[in-house]
Amino acid sequence: MSSKLTYRQSGVDTIEAQSFVHNISAHVKRTQKNRSLFNAFGLFAAAYDLSKYKQPVIVTGTDGVGTKTELLFEQNMPETAGKDLVAMNVNDILTTGGDPLLFLDYLGISNLKRETPRITRLVSGMCDYLESCNCILAGGETAEMPGVVPENLVELAGFCIGCVEKESMIDPSRVQVGDVLVGYESDGFHANGWSLVRRILAQHPDLLSREELRAALAPTRLYHDVVEQMRAANLTPKAYAHITGGGLPENLERFLGDMGAELTVPFWQNDSVQKVLQYVEEEDRFHTFNMGIGWVAIVSPDQVDTAMSVGPQSHVLGIVKQGVGVRVRVAS
């Protein structure tokens, strides 16, 4: 018997990897209906022609899905993980006023053959969201790492590249006292705060039914529709904020400087969420979760009606003030 080994015997199957790339090609093509790469998909790097932009500014972002992934896989919801991965990155690009052009993913797994059905569904979810916002799945990396990545776990990371005309770029430095914060509702916890949610569920395993848990695991909302409708209405907000980890206070304070606001959010009408929140310290809720508001636009007072009309489930949250920080309360 030969003592020599093959790569496959070590747990890595390059033939299976090639087959996986072929299997997801139909999903990839769905993301190239309105935009296309400068060269073919599947090369060593992706290229995009920016010649239609007059003064292009490249914007980039990277993010993951975090500990929510474990629950999504336990509930057999890999498509949602793919949607979360896209939304967490594309929404960040949208805050600049930019167009999301190219998306790349990194998937780390222990065994490709075993995981192919699940990660194919994950890619399908990614492409559902990418197709809806005209962003190309330009490539990615599926790393088979036996002995490093635990079985039944998939490491996820996403990377988005966008572009914006220099004169159209959102400039938060324009925000001033008296401007109005308009919030747009979230579809749930999105992809933040799940380490706390998982701990609560571990301590109270009967807190949520299977249906309630799956409802709480709803994908991060993609706010491309709000931004597109803003553009159609010829409205350029002074700032956008994607409300992720840190909640409304931390995500707004990062660009408000010595200004702030006292915000009032509507009661979060979500039974699954409210069951979880009863076990969270009241003040900490606002610094962990989006509290029902996943996106904020800051506009001048004369633009409020337009900003309210462009997105469903919008609310005036408050007014920018001088030197008060950001404090949030729930409407009584």
Image (cartoon, grey):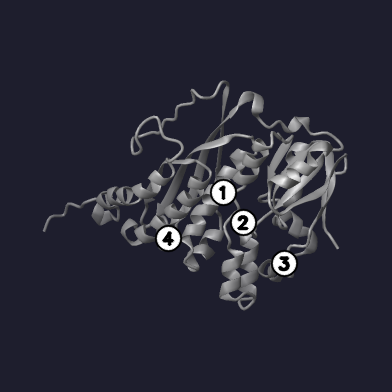
Q: Quadrant of the N terminus?
A: bottom left
Which sits earlier in the primary sequence, circle 2 or circle 4?
4
Number of the front mark, 3 or 4:
3
Which residue is label 1 attached to? 87
Residue sitting farthest toward the left: 1
Secondary element under disc 2, as helix, strand or loop, is loop
Who comes first in sequence, dot 3 or dot 4?
4
Alpha-carbon span between mark 2 and mark 1 = 9 Å
**Mark 2 against mark 4, which lies toward the viewer?**
2
* Contact check, label 2 and label 1, Cβ < 8 Å: yes
Residue located beneath label 2 in the image: 190
* Residue 245 relative to residue 40: left or right: right
Name the secondary structure under disc 4: loop
Q: Position of residue 40 (x, y in %)?
A: 34, 34
Instruction: Give how far apart the Cα atoms at labels 2 and 4 are.
Output: 25 Å
Task: Label 1, secondary structure: give it.
Answer: helix
Residue drawn 85% across the image and 43% down it: 319
Q: What residue would you read off at disc 3?
A: 277
Residue 250 seen from this side: no
Residue where numbered disc 4 is placed: 150
Real-space Cα separation, disc 3 to disc 4, in angstroms: 31 Å
Q: What amino acid type should be assigned to the residue bearing mark 3?
A: Leu
Sooner in the amino-acid sequence: mark 1 or mark 4: 1
Q: Residues within 10 Å of mark 3 (few under 14, many from 20)?
A: some
Indicate which disc, 3 or 2, sits on the residue closer to the N terminus: 2
Between marks 1 and 4 in the image, the one whose residue lies nearer the viewer:
1
Residue drawn 57% across the image and 57% down it = 219
Q: Residue at x 74, y 70 (%)?
A: 278
